[in-house]
Image (cartoon, helix red, strand yellow):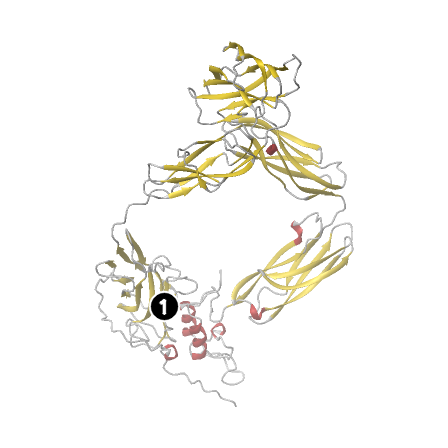
Amino acid sequence: MKTKTLGIAFLTIILLLNFMTFIAVADVPSQPHGADAMWVEPSSVTFDTSNASVGTKFNVTVWLNMTENIFVYQIGMLYNRTQLKCTRAAFTAVTTSMYFLGHATSAPPPVVDAGFLGNGSVLASESCLGSDSLPGPHSGSLIWAEFQVLVVPTAGNLTSNFDITTKYPTFTWVRDPDLAKITITTYNAAYKFVGPAGPPPPPPQLSVSISPLSTTIHVGQTVHFTSTVSGGTVPYTFQWVLNGTPVLVATSNNWDFTPAASEFDVVYLAVTDNNGTIASSANASVTVTPPPGGTRIYVDPSEIIDLTMGPSSTFYINVTVANATDLGLCTFNLTYVPSVISWIGIEVFRVQDQFPIATVMLDGNAGFIWVSLHYSTPVSTDPPAPVVRIRFHVEAYGISPLNLTGTQLLDSGGHPITHDEFDGLFSNIVRDVAVTNVVPSTNWIYQGWSDDINVTVKNLGNVSETFAVSAYYNNSLIGTLPIVNLASNAETTTTITWNTTGVPEGNYTITGVASIVPYEYNTANNVYVDGIVQVVTVIHDVAITSVTPAKSWVYYRSPMKINVTAANLGNVSESFNVTAYADDGMVGTFPVANLASNAQITITFIWNTTSAQQCHNYTLRGEASMVPHEYNTTNNVYVDGIVTVRLAGDVNGDCVVDGADLAIIARAFGSYGPDYLYPGSPPHPRWNPDADLNGDDVVDGSDLVIASRNFGKSCPP
């Protein structure tokens, strides 16, 4: 008969001793609590800049007072990792607690920043062995932890807790000899670092913007730049910069720039606040083009768009004649909107050193000015010559065209001079709507399906606008929807649904269009072209129809079969890949070639769990790669089944190795399985096969070592 000897001696888990410097802790609490309580001493730790700094160290101690018998306890203490660092932690009697002093215990060293508690934590547990327990009532210290100050506040206070309450009763608990949890009261300790009063907050950052940022004008026309400044400290000083050179006379918040030649100019505004802080605007570009050829009469400037010109403001315009030779008579009508502006003055210019005989008729109620200019000696207007200046008064906010009508230019013989006329515009509001994006919900679609065309429009003006937005495929209208009272600077997206019934197979260009509002500032941005949508008719559809694991669990490092079934639901043969996953980890990929319409195939994958996480629940899924123009993509993925892989030492299967597991192993400590002593021998009365971590049919120090090495570890969530 073969006999085995069980060599198990006194065990305080010497193998876990970490040779820390012994720190004597008097086993008399300075702030005792009532029965069945666990608490942290001191109850409050307070520092200020006079008695502590970065690097200062201090200790806290955890105490326990119980009336009942206990077998095992666990502490899950949290602290603020941004304020403090736990430099070390240990039991109060080095390898055991003062509470359990004199008893053989399983006591792995406390773990700082335990995985499942996260950074800013201390985990500690201690268990009696076998049938031993500690009778109550009893009181004593459990662990101490040393902390180091990481930060000192520059202003205000830093506060946090040494917290054993938040994780109670999940990770802070006490169990009786039957391993049942005992109800206890937990008490945290407070941490506070009092900082000095802080300086006053700085002023908002200085920023500056200008308008317009891009414009094109002819030689002789004027750009009116305006600015908006915020932040910093008033008062401000202003300096406009042209092509890198400060403009000496341009030192106010606005600037009228009149270039004299065809060129490309870059303009920005530099602002200095009262503290000397300098901020610059973005660069504005001005493209200056030559005046158009041929004889012409025009309003100059052609546009006056200025949001700052409210009622009672005034402005001037010139009526200018260009490229006229032998001009004897100039006649024109100028009309305007009298509810927006009114004339308050008119003056006639000398041309080639002679004043014309001028006749003027004015009707302020109708918004009408008629002017006739007769030159006794014919004149030439090359370069362009202003003939009349008119001063207007702003009556209200709005838009007024400055239209030239009935223009007549005659030479010295009374013959008409062929010419063009160019109107002007005044506005102290801006009207401009734009399409800023067009996004089809898909870039391909089956004939007969509906495709949502998302058209984004924006009101770039400063008054609310009502207009229409349309979507087109090629030149065919998809649909039109109204946009009502879109506020200034607001943006909205409207969805126009394209029903592709009857649309032939092919590629189609999608366009969004906003209708033009009256006197629109910029009509080029009313149209937006984006992308191609393909209409198809042949159905392509592959699917995963089942995922079946061989069983619901697997041992770490053991292989497992996973069957994945794929089907071709379309009407043409398809080639694609089938992939099996455990969570996001790929088990394997199998290429399926030319699977016929309405056929299916089952692939068996072998999952090698060597690299799997222990004590983790894996969700299995199968995926079929999408084929071009997939009719239904929702069936390409099939999720089915949970397979569990356990962490070594996690005896109770809760994905955590803690005091509860140590207690189960400690309870079975010294036990053995059937047939261990001799063939046919019965198991030990305390035998628990789950506690035999190394599979040698005995629960001894080797199993405690495995569990202790993983103490404080947990599987990822």
Residue 36 visible in rendering: no
Position of 468 compared to 124: left or right?
right
Task: Please identify the quarter of the rendering in which residue 443 is found.
Answer: top right
Rendering coords of residue 501 (x, y %): 73, 36
Question: In this picture, is 22 found above or below 488?
Answer: below
Residue 373 x, y percent position in the rendering: 56, 13
Foreground pick, 541 / 647:
541
The quarter holding residue 708 reads bottom left
Residue pointed to by mark 1: 124
Instruction: Please name the residue shown 41% across and 71% down the image.
Output: 662
Local crowd size for mark 1, using a 10 Å CA cut-off: few (<14), some (14–19), many (≥20): many
Number of labels in the image equals: 1
Foreground: 250 or 348?
Answer: 348
Location of residue 351 with respect to 214 vertically, above or below:
above
Frontmost residue, 620 versus 379: 379
Question: In the figure, is residue 621 to the left or right of 117?
Answer: right
Compared with 15, 200 (above or below) is above
Q: Which residue is depicted at the point 21% across and 59% down?
A: 50
Q: What element carries label 1?
A: strand
Q: What residue type is labelled 1?
A: Ala
Residue pushed farthest bottom? 1
Q: Nearer the viewer, residue 316 or 187?
A: 316
Image location of residue 9, percent across then percent down: 38, 83
- Examine the rendering and report whether any part of residue 189 can be seen: yes
Residue 26 relative to residue 344: left or right? left
